[in-house]
């Protein structure tokens, strides 16, 4: 008894010391950020540290003569990613709190506050499954479009955008889809449908149709992505879905492996028949191997996707095996387009800067000022009536690019 007590006390003290170290590391980070200090090399020994430090050298070369990278001067995408990586280092170097996700509570709260919307979506979906075999092509297409839109607007629910404030999905996610169509600035859903239907027709037993979802936020958005993924399998439009999540806590609400499994468990054990049915089916999909969850350190590096083939050739080669890549969310869009301030009419294909592992589509609500592939005058027209259109999350795109 005495021994156990001493052991617990010892652990507790270790925890308190680790917390103090993490807090001092974080206050140092805050001070550097607030006073525009130079970006410094990472000093930890985590597996991606060398790549981060090489990237810092690359940024130093770019800013030659301008004093080197610093918080206010360097590209926003770079320093924002760097901030999340430093937050991770503060914890990861400090056992026993090295696996602690500082954003976990916020993500769980978003999930619980979206409960009604999750119930509405799971109920709708389970009803749909009852007669999915009897649906003709037109009806299947309509259902796909609905679930794509739910997944698109699900991207409104992220926590970094709302600075951690409530951003859960409150209303029924299916109700107002029709009214929101005018807010989809680029709507390539028809192209997705053709691609999937053609892939299915060409599909022989040897070649499975594979769709990859590059996930964004946990909470309601993740549930909407899982429902979409279930629909793709249940409608036989796809045979496998591969999910890609983050290997470290990222941009507050992004999905990690823990969030992914936690969400499915929560649904499974929910006190609601259709919610728990979804959770049970989804765990079954993972066990059968028709759903696969993967993470790769590339997703939490500062590089945009045009350098994936060089920096993470294994990931690029894996994505090349897919029939369709669905990139969720604003940060993925920024990385797809190099976060440049493109003329609105520059073709999406061009903004991708040779990133074409497979046909791809971005489902993203606009929260940052990067947008390509609009019609002439389209951006200017919205700008005139709504100056905040690029950052207020009210508009979205379902923007497709066929591979080379
Ligand atoms: O979760 P999402 O859709 O990638 O949004 C995150 C966005 O929020 C911000 O952190 C703040 O607006 C952007 O940098 C980022 O693009
Ligand atoms: Mn996010």
Image: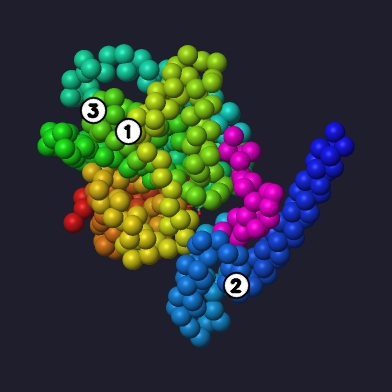
Q: Is mark 2 within 8 Å of ligand 1?
A: no
Residue at 41% x, 40% y: name it: 293
314 over 51 or under it: above or below:
above
Pinpoint residue 72: horizontal percent, then vertical percent. 58, 69
The magenta segment is 85-108
| Residue sitting at the far right | 2
Q: Can the viewer see residue 159 in this picture?
A: yes
Q: Is 112 included in the stretch rendered in magenta?
A: no
**Disc assigned to residue 290:** 1
Pinpoint residue 385: horizontal percent, then vertical percent. 42, 48
Residue at 30% x, 45% y: name it: 325
Disc on the earlier residue, 1 or 2: 2
Pinpoint residue 398: horizontal percent, then vertical percent. 32, 43
In terms of secondary structure, where does tag 3 sit? loop
Kindly identify which residue carries mark 3: 236
Residue at 64% x, 65% y: name it: 33
């Amino acid at each position: 008894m005495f021994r156990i007590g001493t052991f617990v006390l010892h652990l507790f003290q270790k925890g308190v010391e680790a917390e103090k170290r993490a807090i001092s590391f974080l206050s140092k980070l805050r001070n550097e950020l607030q006073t525009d200090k130079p970006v410094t090399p990472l000093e930890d020994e985590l597996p991606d540290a060398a790549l981060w430090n090489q990237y810092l050298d690359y940024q130093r070369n770019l800013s030659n003569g301008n004093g080197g990278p610093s918080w206010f001067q360097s590209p926003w995408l770079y320093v924002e990613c760097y901030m999340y990586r430093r937050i991770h280092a503060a914890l990861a170097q400090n056992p026993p709190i090295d696996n602690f996700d500082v954003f976990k509570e916020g993500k769980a709260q978003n999930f619980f506050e979206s409960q009604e919307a999750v119930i509405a979506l799971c109920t709708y979906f389970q009803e749909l499954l009852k007669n999915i075999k009897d649906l003709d092509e037109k009806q299947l297409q309509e259902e796909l479009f609905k679930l794509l839109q739910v997944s698109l607007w699900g991207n409104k629910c992220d926590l970094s955008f709302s600075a951690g404030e409530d951003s859960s999905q409150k209303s029924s996610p299916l109700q107002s889809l029709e009214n929101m169509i005018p807010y989809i600035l680029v709507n390539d859903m028809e192209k997705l449908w053709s691609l999937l239907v053609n892939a299915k027709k060409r599909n022989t037993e040897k070649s499975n149709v594979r769709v990859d979802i590059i996930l964004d936020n946990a909470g309601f958005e993740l549930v909407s992505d899982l429902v979409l993924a279930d629909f793709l399998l249940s409608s036989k439009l796809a045979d496998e879905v591969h999910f890609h999540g983050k290997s470290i806590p990222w941009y507050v609400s992004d999905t990690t492996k823990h969030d992914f499994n936690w969400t499915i468990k929560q649904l499974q054990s929910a006190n609601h028949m259709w919610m728990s049915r979804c959770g049970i089916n989804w765990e079954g999909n993972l066990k059968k191997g028709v759903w696969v969850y993967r993470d790769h350190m590339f997703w939490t590096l500062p590089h945009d996707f045009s350098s994936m083939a060089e920096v993470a050739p294994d990931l690029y080669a894996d994505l090349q095996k897919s029939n369709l890549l669905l990139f969720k969310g604003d940060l993925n869009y920024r990385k797809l387009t190099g976060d440049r301030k493109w003329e609105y009419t520059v073709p999406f294909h061009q903004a991708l800067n040779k990133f074409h592992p497979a046909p791809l589509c971005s489902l993203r609500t606009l929260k940052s000022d990067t947008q390509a592939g609009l019609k002439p005058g389209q951006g200017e027209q919205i700008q005139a009536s709504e100056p905040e259109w690029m950052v207020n999350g009210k508009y979205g795109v379902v923007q497709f690019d066929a591979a080379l």
